[in-house]
């Protein structure tokens, strides 16, 4: 039983490492494409311009926030 828990722990660590590795792009890419950071008009989070959603001259971090913002300013 304890061996099962050990294997599970290993699996969790491997999963976590892979996840954090995949989330961070290699440093080389960052310097190459030092692109503009924009701010989500809904929640204020900063994100790369290429990952943002542009609507009505304002940037958003995701489609849901674009919609929320549009609803609020009808
Ligand atoms: Zn947002």
Image (cartoon, helix red, strand yellow):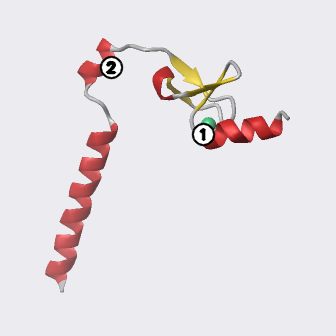
x, y percent for residue 10: 18, 64
- Image quarter where the N terminus lies is bottom left
Find numbered disc 1 in the image and state the secondary structure of the residue it sits on: helix
Quarter in which the C terminus is drawn:
top right
Query: Foreground mark, 2 or 1?
Result: 1
Residue 23 falls in image quadrant = top left
Taking depth in this image into account, of 10 and 32 the one nearest to the observer is 32
In the rendered structure, the answer to whether residue 59 lies left or right of residue 69 reads left
Which quarter of the frame holds ligand 1?
top right
Q: Residues within 10 Å of mark 2 (few under 14, many from 20)?
A: few
The vertical placement of 29 against 5, above or below, is: above
Within-10-Å neighbours for mark 1: few <14, some 14–19, many 20+: few
Q: Find numbered disc 2 in the image and state the secondary structure of the residue it sits on.
A: helix
Q: Which residue is mark 2?
A: 30
- Which residue in the structure is indicated by mark 1? 63
For this orientation, the residue located farthest to the right is 74
Looking at the rendered structure, which numbered label has been put on residue 49?
none
Q: Is residue 4 left or right of residue 42?
A: left
Location of residue 2 (image quadrant)? bottom left
Q: Earlier in the sequence, mark 2 or mark 1?
A: 2
């Amino acid at each position: 039983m304890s061996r099962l828990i050990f294997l599970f722990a290993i699996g969790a660590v491997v999963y976590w490492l892979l996840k954090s590795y995949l989330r961070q792009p290699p440093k080389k890419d960052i310097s190459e494409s030092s692109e503009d950071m924009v701010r989500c008009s809904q929640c204020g989070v900063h994100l790369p311009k290429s990952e943002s959603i542009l609507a009505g001259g304002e940037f958003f971090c995701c489609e849901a926030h674009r919609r929320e913002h549009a609803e609020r300013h009808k």
